[in-house]
Amino acid sequence: MGEQGTQEPKGIYGKYHIVKADGSPTDPKAVYFVLRLDTDPFARRAMVAYAAACEEDQPALAADILRLVRKTNTVHG
């Protein structure tokens, strides 16, 4: 903690352990970046940008992402 109880900015650091839903191993050389949509408005904006980037090649994915972001915005503002 910084002065007067404020938290120091941490940048990127290892906060999560990634496990595949089906239990199969992850690639140990892979790079993952976790976004928490329910508490982080920057994460929601990043997902909107991702949806825009993949919309032409993967329209179903883009639509799913936007639906998730809208749902998260409705619940968490």
Image (cartoon, rainbow, N blue to C red):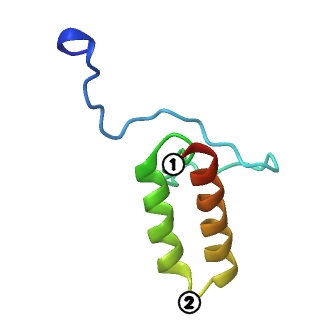
Q: Amino acid at mark 2?
A: Glu
Q: Tell which of 57 and 27 is nearer to you.
A: 57
Q: Is residue 41 above or below residue 13?
A: below
Residue 51: mark in rendering: none
Q: Name the image quarter holding the N terminus.
A: top left
Q: Amino acid at mark 1?
A: Leu
At a point 80% along the width and 45% down the height, the residue shown is 23
Give the left or right position of residue 39, taking residue 10 as reference. Answer: right
Q: Residue furthest right?
A: 22
Q: How many marks?
A: 2
At a point 30% along the width and 32% down the height, the residue shown is 10
Dot 1 lies on which element?
loop
Q: Is residue 27 visible?
A: no
How many neighbours does mark 2 have within 10 angstroms: few (below 14), some (14-19), or many (20 or more)?
few
At a point 48% along the width and 32% down the height, the residue shown is 15
Give the left or right position of residue 65, taking residue 45 as reference. Answer: right
x, y (%) of residue 13? Answer: 38, 36
The residue to which callout 2 is attached is 56
The residue to which callout 1 is attached is 35
Q: Residue furthest bottom?
A: 56
Q: CA distance from mark 2 to mark 1?
A: 23 Å
x, y (%) of residue 51? Answer: 53, 73
Rendering quarter of residue 19: top right
How many neighbours does mark 1 have within 10 angstroms: few (below 14), some (14-19), or many (20 or more)?
few
x, y (%) of residue 58? Answer: 63, 83
Dot 2 lies on which element?
loop
